[in-house]
Every structure is written in C-alpha cells, then in structure tokens.
Amino acid sequence: MKLTIPGLRALVPLGIMAVLAGVFTFSVSADSTITIPVPEDIKDKQVTLSLRIPPNTEPLKRDQSKPTLASKRSLIIWNNNPSPKIDNNDEIHGVFNTFLRKGWFKNHASRTLVRVRPMDKYYAIRLLQNLTENVIEIGMAPNFGQVSKKCNLSVSDIEDLRRMLKRYEKDLIIFGMNVTKSDKDLLMLQERFKKARQGILKVLRVEGGDDGDTIIHLSVE
C-alpha cells in the first residue's frame, strides 16, 4: 500500500525555501552580501520569499524629562512698554510747535498728533520723518531763490531739525529712514538759505518801551 500526501509536490519548494532561509541566517557576510542557491525549477513556482534584516543598532533612548532653564537670563524678556512716552518738557515738543505754527505739518493727522500729551515715541519718530520730508522739498523747487525769500523758515529752524535727527538717529534708522542722506540734504538747504538771504534783516519781535518808544528786535541773516 502506497501512502500519498496531497499537495506534497507543492510543499517541497516551500520546504526548500525554509531551509534556504535558515542557511541565509548564518551566511550573511560582513559586507552584507547574500548568496542564496536557487534550484533551476524554482522559477516555475510562484513562491514569494520575505526577508527581514534586523538593524545592528540599539533603539534611541529619548530623554522624557522636561528641560530646565539654567538661569533667568535665558528667559525671553517681554517688553510691556515697546513705545515709551516722550517727556512733556522734552525739547522736541518746542521744535514741533515751531514748525506747526509755521504750517509745516501739512495734514490734519500730524497736526493733531503734535498736540497730544503725553506723546508716544513712535508718533514722535513718525512726525520727525514727515517733517523732514516736507522741509527737504524746499530744496527741490526750481525757483529756489524766490521760494527761500518767501519761506518762513530760518536757518536756526533747520539746525534744530537736524539736531533732532541726530538725537533720534537709531530710531529713525529702524523705521527705514536714511538719516545720513537727510542730514546732508538739510545741511545743503541751510547753506543755500544763507546765500539767498545774505544781508536780509528779519523782524523778531516788536515791544513798547516804558517811555513810549517802540523797540524792534531784528536779526541779520
């Protein structure tokens, strides 16, 4: 009597592959080259061989503890006053008021801000930018000689403006202003005013004397 196991022929290739897998486990060379002898008739069988190569590394150990700050200096310092106030007695208010009185703040918003007390430093810098641009426009006039004689600004007014630019130079640069160029333009405007107004008498103020006389204060430019 002959004992027949159904599907024996189909199991033979699988057995061969299992043996090869065992051989493969011990035949991996140092350079990771794998050599597997495959029978010629195995290509006719639909056999899938899955290999798993465990990495030769250990799992990364992650530190689950919360980081601690070494000192308070490493903390982010929150500035709760990013725009400090300008002191009410600051010189810049006097400069602004002079140009306001002479009409060099040309829009309603800027004229309103000049009168605000206390004034944010942010607004002071913006006003200084706007004022400088308005004054520099004088030098671009094609008939500068006539404009300079009618202009109500003095050389000392421009000098005051230049001094404010120098004082707030760092802040103006942060807001994108080329302070060096603006100061150069104002200096050139000063020199042109001096030449155009040379020998001109300017009335500063008129006062009444105790004896009934009239005193006129003049300046020579």
Image (tube, rainbow, N blue to C red):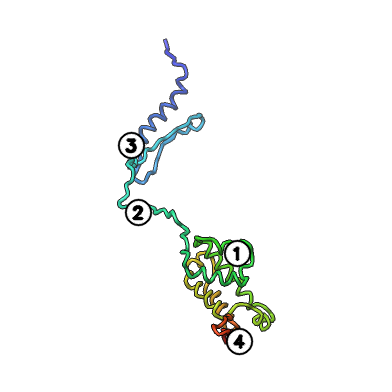
From the image, tell me which residue sits under label 3. Answer: 26
Q: Nearer the viewer, mark 3 or mark 2?
A: 2
Query: Taking 72 as reference, is 44 above or below it?
Result: above
Q: Considering the numbered disc 2 on the image, is that residue within a helix, a strand or a loop?
A: helix
Q: Residue at x 39, y 54 (%)?
A: 77
Mark 2 or 4, nearer chain start: 2
Q: Amino acid at mark 4?
A: Leu
Marker disc for residue 111? 1
Q: Amino acid at mark 2?
A: Ser
> How far across and how far down the image is residue 177, in percent?
54, 68
Quadrant of the image containing the N terminus: top left
Measure how far apart labels 2 and 4 are at the Cα level: 63 Å
Query: Taking 195 as reference, is 60 above or below it?
Result: above
Measure how far apart labels 3 and 4 are at the Cα level: 110 Å
Q: Nearer the viewer, mark 1 or mark 3?
A: 1
Query: Taking 19 as reference, is 219 above or below it?
Result: below
> How far across and how far down the image is residue 12, in percent?
43, 25
Q: Amino acid at mark 3?
A: Phe
Q: Would you say the residues marked 4 and 1 are in contact, meaning their CB atoms lie under 8 Å apart?
A: no
Measure how far apart labels 4 and 1 are at the Cα level: 30 Å
> How far across and how far down the image is residue 86, in percent?
47, 63
Q: Amino acid at mark 1?
A: Arg
Q: Is residue 87 visible?
A: yes
Q: Callout 2 environment at 10 Å: few (<14), some (14 to 19), or many (20+)? A: few
From the image, tell me which residue sits under label 2. Answer: 74
